Image (spheres, rainbow, N blue to C red):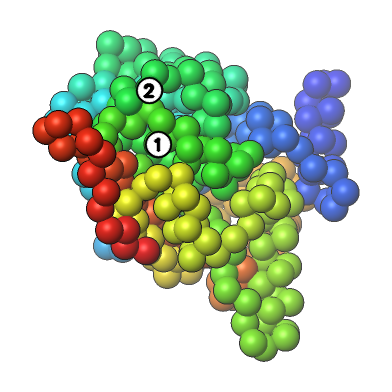
Amino acid sequence: MSDNAAGRFFEYLNWLLNPFHGLKTTEVYDLIGTTSLTEHRLYLNLGYWRDVATIDEASEALALLVAKRGGMGAGDVVLDCGYGFGDQDILWTGSMKLARIVGLNITRSQVERARKNVADAGLERLIDLREGSATEMPIANESVDLVVSLESAFHYRTREDFFREAYRVLRPGGRLVTADIVPTKNSDNPFRRLEQWISWSLVAGKFNIPPENYYLIPSYSNKLSGAGFVNIDITSIRDDVYAPLHEYLSKDQSFVNKLPPVAMIMAKSALRRSAASVYAGLDYILSYAEKPGKSEDGQVLHAQAKG
């Protein structure tokens, strides 16, 4: 084993096993690299498992669900925050007839690989993937139709800053859609509540979810409203994410077997437990909100929020 490989292995080990060792978001994804659940793409999302059979299909289905919920369509300028390796952008561009997609991502290794994927697909004219922050967007005011964050907003410091920036860059009548992870409501059962705390703490600790983002769906809605959004709709889709993913990985352990030894042991241990236990503290939401439009005389139209 080379010195570089040995160093990476021990960093991986320290990340997994040391409860006092946290990594920045960029460091987490640099460490994970191109280790992806999917076989044919590099999707990093957990998938939407209604009417699909494989992780590749589920990951694509989640990207398409987000696009549909956001009303993504012909002529839209889309801002994709936290685009990973760009697979969803390639998918959307090929199926939605968009004007263009601008992407923001703070992990340089992902930016470089995503740009290569876009170039290989011949879509550089339509997809502009940038290195930049979703909480300090290098994007002009009122310049995009739809802002998307697919399984990344829980990382942002903070999600509220992201909401404010999304509101700023959206045109009047523009939309914001997120697929996001939040905690579940505490159970009245103390043993179940402990299980929820362990479940959430493991994910939040290892994947750098800041404490400022620990809140439930009602608070999520309030924070969107506080940023100025209206027509807010938030739906939990956890039953179509966690349990079927757990079942799939339990049956097909080809991905698990590719992991480094300690990670593989931990993953197999988790798969021997029930999905209800492993994901006890995790909700998974699909969130939609709109920036108010303007009337013919330029006045902002205020709609009644639905939360």
Q: Percent x, y for residue 279?
A: 59, 67
Residue 248 lies, with reference to residue 40, above or below; the image says below
Q: Badge 2, how many Cα within 10 Å: few under 14, some, many 20+?
A: some
Residue 171 vertical placement versus 182 (above, below): above
Q: Nearer the viewer, residue 51 or 1?
A: 51
Task: Using the numbered discs, state the Cα–Cα distance from disc 1 to disc 2 in whole angstroms.
Answer: 9 Å
Q: Can residue 42 be seen by looking at this rendering?
A: no
Quick one: 26 or 303, which is closer to the camera?
303
Q: Cβ–Cβ below 8 Å for labels 1 and 2?
A: no
Residue drawn at (48%, 18%) of the image = 138
Say what secondary structure mark 1 lies in: helix
* Residue kind at label 1, given as amino acid type: Tyr
- Other-residue count near label 1 (Cα within 10 Å), few / some / many at <14 / 14–19 / ≥20: many
Say left or right for 167 vs 223.
left
The quarter of the rendered structure image containing the C terminus is: bottom left
Side (left or right) of 60 relative to 179: left
Q: Residue at x 83, y 29 (%)?
A: 6
Q: Which residue corresponds to mark 1? A: 167
Examine the rendered structure and indicate whether residue 12 appears above or below residue 2.
below
Residue 71: assigned label: none
Q: Is residue 100 above or below residue 232?
A: above
> Is residue 270 something that shows in the picture?
yes
Residue at the farthest left position: 296
Q: Which residue is mark 2?
A: 141
**Please, which residue is most extreme toward the bottom here?**
189
Q: Residue at x 14, y 31 (%)?
A: 297
Q: Picture coordinates of residue 111 (x, y %)?
A: 52, 20
